[in-house]
Amino acid sequence: MDRSTEPLRDAAHPATSPCTHTAGHDHGHHDHHPDHAGPRESHVSFDGAGEGAWSRFRIEAMDCPTEQTLLQKRLGTVAGVHGLEFNLINRVLGVRHSLPDTGPIEAAIAETGMTAVPLAQAQAEEAHTPAPSKRGRITLVAGLVAAAAAELCHLYQVGPPWLVIVLALLAICTSGLGTYRKGWIALRQLNLNINALMSIAVTGAALIGQWPEAAMVMVLFAVAERIEARSLERARNAIGALMQLAPATATVREADGQWRPREVAQIQIGSLLRARPGERIALDGEVTAGRSTVNQAPITGESLPVDKIIGDTLFAGTVNQEGELEYRATKVASDSTLSRILRVVEQAQGSRAPTQRFVDRFSRIYTPAVIVLACVTGLVPPLLGLGTWLEWAYRALVLLVVACPCALVISTPVTLVSGLAAAARRGILVKGGAYLEMAHSLEWLALDKTGTLTRGLPELTDVLPLHGDPSHLKAIAASLASRSDHPVSKALAVGLGNIGESEVAEFEALPGRGSRGRVDDTLYTLGNHRLVEEQGLCDEALEITLAGLEQQGKSVVVLCDARQPLAVFAVADTLRGTSAAAITRLHDLGVKTLMLSGDNQAAAAAIAAQVGIDEARGNLLPEDKLQAIEALASKGHVVGMVGDGINDAPALARAHIGFAMGAAGSHTAIETADVALMDDDLRKVGEFIALSRRTRRLLIQNIALALGIKAVFLALTFLGMATLWMAVFADMGVSLLVVFNGLRLLRPNQSASANSATA
């Protein structure tokens, strides 16, 4: 299926934690499953290859790998179900099936204690759901007051003993019933998630007489969960803001000539729209009337507004600033550049980076191992006479709380989603967390020349009159060049401009050499070095002049009459203004550069020398570029490739990371590249590598925090120095630490380009 035609849904709410237990937002509905671009470790296929249609559900309770395993086992036995796809960050389950309806699927999910809601239905329900009341906050405060009162009564021996129990039960009931309900479902399915572990720990503490502590632990857990959910709103809103870029309605010219507002989703290609100053562009389009400047930063990341006149392209979600614009829609809402960006972001969230896959595998081993350790701790020491049963039972309960790998599991997706959002803000579209993480290790970056380092449009660079009036010679050259469709002639005609062209008689194109024609009864030729030599007019002085220009990578054209050369013109594909700075930045990051060009070696070497590229290779066909990438990769190097996403497709596909330049408005570039640079600024490759290295450091920091604090707390538990209070702080506290640490990537002033640290 063509991904460009599938409307994006769930990009607005990407960052719901795998271990947060509040209800997530809805994620829309896909009737069919898109071919995701990034690596999809969460995809599970049972049988068949691409068989059946895809249905998607939101499952609020699917927040850890244990739920994923449970659903895999249960749905794997349902006839007609052919494959599953899990997105734990968004709590989205995709089911590929050949069933007439989704009833059997929803019933099977219900047997696991989880509820599946079709995403379209969930979205509609969410749209009509009133704002959350203060009831949850009030009950939480009541529970906290009751728990504190129980502690004080116990500490100062106030009132009868049953008062402490009543206050503790009140605290547990007001703040922990939801945890108990989820924990019971998890235990029924032999799924030891944080709710099950907390339920066991609190119940155990109460049974051994630790009522005040049981109450305070449950309340602290509820408070920590609420704080964690709030902190994740930042990551959710970072990409969710993209959904608000395009307006819901636009002013459209109707058949009767009147301008009326219409819903954007109903506007068809070819419709005429109007955007007043300050309004957002509703759909991709082409300016038909007016002149203005447009802020394209939401799409391309450009820091300065761009002038727009008749014929220029507009992108949905950008902001019209000065004048009124009328434009013709060239894409429907579901196929706009913004929609494709959102679709790619959604797919990127579902993919799993290497670190995340490692964490998932590790947590599957870690949690059962700690639970077994807790059981051993509660049984073996008292059997050996090393303490009382109550003492070691308490320590075992502490270990159960420590056993939950919430902080470890949450550490990677929050950091990666924050990195993806930070990149999108800068006009860098990343297909998946794997590419964001891999970029930190790039050693070589191969670059196409035309359209990447250069503008891709030849321009007149040199005019050297040899004999005669310069103005007259330019007019003759312009007259001949304007009658040819060769790219060099076109560049020459544009560069010379309207300088009084003369009538040309007997015009003749000379394939591979140039052209000739009669102007004012004189026969002139305008051609390349070869044509001059064929005429026998190439003397030593001219040879030196031509050689010097050709060594600079320029295409040379000579105007001659029957007796002598009259003027020399040079045309070249000029460098982008940012190319030299981009190469310097890459070298500062320790990345070596290689130019791969189809132009001649002299032209390639000249451009490479101007910008400081390490190595340049010319006269390359697409298969030659592919071989160059393969040669580097075969030596163990991590290689990136920057191109236009079309002509360099083989090399882009073979590189570890393929970068597409100027992808805004280019359907193919967005769909084929691993990383799409939405404008033509090559410096963003360096920004992306720096962002990747920062993301990598935060991932390592978060994993070290999660595992380090757990290890310290395990030691404290065995030494009898840890309490259930401390266990909750250790578990939920480190979860908050890794969340806040990952969210640092979203700081507005945290510029990846300013980060020059190497791997």
Image (tube, grey):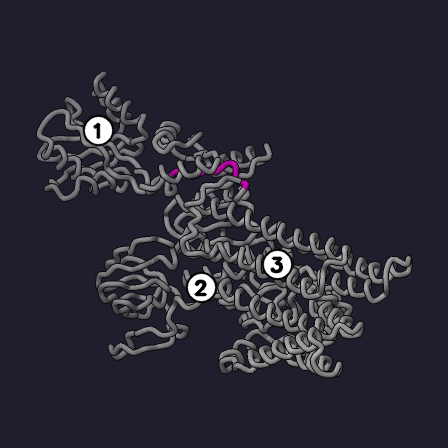
Can the viewer see residue 76 in this picture? no
Residue 442: in magenta span: yes
For label 2, the SS is: helix
Q: Are marks 1 and 2 in contact (CB under 8 Å)?
A: no
Mark in front: 3 vs 1: 3
**Magenta-drawn segment:** 441-449
Mark 1 is surrounded, within 10 Å at the Cα level, by few (under 14), some (14 to 19) or many (20 or more) other residues, namely many
Can you see residue 141? yes
Residue identified by numbered label 2 = 339
Q: Residue at x 65, y 71 (%)?
A: 61
Mark 3 secondary-structure assignment: helix
Residue 257 coordinates in the image, percent (x, y)? 24, 77
Residue at the outermost top position: 540
Residue most extreme to the right: 384
Q: Which residue is mark 3?
A: 734
* Amino acid type at mark 1: Val
Q: Is residue 650 magenta?
A: no
Q: Say above or below: 191 vs 43.
A: below
- Foreground: 170 or 289? 170
Disc 1 target residue = 558
- Check the picture and name the quadrant holding the N terminus: bottom right
Q: Nearer the viewer, residue 189 or 666?
A: 189
Q: Nearer the viewer, mark 2 or mark 3?
A: 3
Whole-percent x, y for residue 452 in the image: 39, 42
Residues at marks 1 and 2, CA–CA distance in whole angstroms: 50 Å
* Residue under the point 9% across and 27% down: 468
